[in-house]
Every structure is written in C-alpha cells, then in structure tokens.
Image (cartoon, helix red, strand yellow):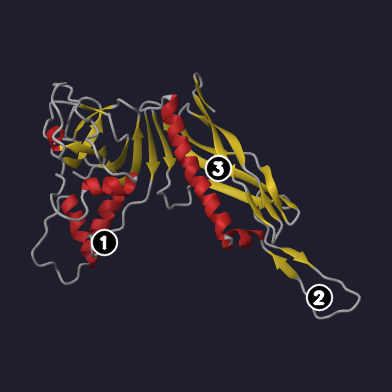
Amino acid sequence: MIAINQPPRSLEVELPLTTLLNDYSVQLKIREQTVAVSLDLSGGPREVQSEPISVGSFDGVPIMAQISFQYDYNVDEDELTIHGNDDRTEDQLRITAFLQSAPGQLPDQRVEFNARPNDAGTNQPVTKLWADYVAKNTTLHQRLMDIAHRCNEILVDAAIEAGVGRVVELGTAPVVTLDNLDDFKRMYGRPIVAEPPTDRTAELAEIQELVRSTYVGTVTWADNADFANVRGSTHDPKVDGLSWIALWEEKCKATAHYCTSHNWFSNDHTRPCNGVLIGGHVITGQESSREHKGATVYIYPICTRHNANNNSYMHVVYNNKGVQLKYWE
C-alpha cells in the first residue's frame, strides 16, 4: 500500500520484515510478516523505527522483529535520501530480530542446567546463543539480508510512484587498486605517464581519496525528468577498462542499451540518437552549465550526439537510475 498526503507530506509504505522459515533441529519457526512504516516528508533528517512485533518462536521463546532506517527529505529539491544497498556504514537499513525475553536487544545467552537422579557428567551449563545461531545459520542470515535489500528497493519505487522527484541512495565509493589505478586516472582526467613511478602508493592514495570524496551513491529520477550537460566536464575515456559508463553499469547493476534521452532532443524532436553511448556528466534542469567544485553532478548513459549538444536539454526516457557525484572540476 502506497499513499502520499499533503500537508504535512508523508509516505506510507508496507515493507517486508521476515519470510517463512522452519528449522526443527532447534524448534525455530518464523512466518512471513510485513510492517507498515510512515515517512515524514515535511523536511529534514528523520529516523523510522517500527514497533517490535512477534514473527515466530525459537525453542518455544517468541521471536520479535523490527525495522529501522534513516532518511532525509529536501523539500526545495523534492529529493529523498536513504542509505542504499551499496552502503557499508553502520547507518544501513536494519532488521533486528530478538527473543521476547530481552526486548530491544539480543540476549547474551540462555543457560540450561540438567539435574538428574544420578550425575553422569552432564551436569554442566549448556549455552544457546540466539545471536550466535542467527550469525551461523547462513539460510536465516541471508534471508534477512535479502529482505533488507528488498526494503530499500521498495522504498525507492514507492517514493517515485508517489511523486517524489528523485531518490538518492548513499553508497560506498569504488576501491582503487594498482590494477585499476590508471583507469580511474583517465576517468578523472589525470595524465598517464609512459613509465609510472616505482612507488605508486602515494599516487594510489591520492586517487582513492579523490574517488571517495566525489562518489555519493546512486540516484533514481522520476520519468520524464529534464536534465542537461555539464559544460567542460571530463570526457569519457575511449580506452579498454573502467570508464564512466562502466562505473554506471557497475553501481546501477544494469547494462546501457539506450541513451537515457533516447531520440529526444529539446531543440529538434525529429533528430535521432546515434547509438554510441558514453557516461555523460549531467545536471538536473534545462540549462547546461559549468559547475563548481563540490556541486552535485550525475553520470547517465547518453549518446555522443547528445553529449556534444549543449544547446539542447534532455529528457528521461530510459535509465531512471544514475550515479551521483560531487564535482571535482
């Protein structure tokens, strides 16, 4: 169920919480469960934390679960920001499952003591760790991770469907290695010398910091959003290896088959794309411009004909998802 209301603006979304799973060796029973959450879109950073609900039992003890995540809504830009599936920080969307005997946290242990008429050497504490079971049970752990992954996808789709202009998914910057160092240097317009220095550690650290400080994450735009070229931006490298469009494909988990503004030019609706795709540096709106250091820019697949035409703005026809960067001049 998806609904958006004004005022105040809010987004109501039904998210998956758990899925059906039984493990009779430890009397684990988990049922499929969803939870309704509400996002306050009146502006600013917020946090959602659902109330714990019962989702099953573990050795007869009720299992409770809840979901929590952070988000930020920029009213002026009509932009929702969440921590996406590529994020590696502690701020990721979180599904917490715990035993009812310790609400709100994972209990350290549950101790059993066996008393028999004759002590046969088994009268020792037996520890059962719920958290340890979750961590070691790859099936349960993976299913909870898959659900958390799906929650982010549902949040993005729900926001766009409800009319939010764009959704940013904060992520983790690519890792620069000695194998791909030159590829990233080409992407950022750095010269490639014929004989690289013997010690490339400092150079690698410099480029990694550049990538880390400029990469933001991915962004999803609404259908028919207008965008234009960044004037004077780094050209997509025409070499084998990593390029801006390859970075787009890696981070957006997609293959570019069409120009994002396929066969759509604002100044000539009869002009077709030429089919040669690059990762173009673009901005929102209908005017191309030169951007200052730190400005928000995006990488989207566009054809070289669009990339060479700064007098025409573009329109999202394909490829709603792109890469968001901070411009480095």
Name which residue lies at 37% across and 51% down. 172
Name which residue lies at 17% across and 25% down. 265
Q: Which numbered disc covers residue 172?
A: none
| Circles 2, 3 touching at the beta carbon (< 8 Å) | no
Question: Is label 3 in a helix, a strand or a loop?
Answer: strand
Residue 272's place in the image compared with 209, above or below, is above
Q: CA distance from mark 2 to mark 1?
A: 57 Å
Is 148 on the left-hand or right-hand side of 109? left
Three-letter amino acid code at the position of disc 1: Ala
Kindly identify which residue carries mark 1: 205
Kindly identify which residue carries mark 3: 68
Specify which label sits upstream in the sequence, 2 or 3.
3
Mark 2 Cα within 10 Å, few/some/many (few <14, many 20+)?
A: few
Is 55 on the left-hand or right-hand side of 218? right
Q: Indicate the quadrant containing the C terminus: top left, top right, bottom left or bottom right.
A: top left
In this view, the mark in front (1 or 3): 3
Residue 292, how many percent across, how many down? 21, 38
Kindly identify which residue carries mark 2: 123
Is 278 on the left-hand or right-hand side of 15? left
Three-letter amino acid code at the position of disc 2: Asn
Residue 210's place in the image compared with 265, above or below, is below
- Circle count: 3
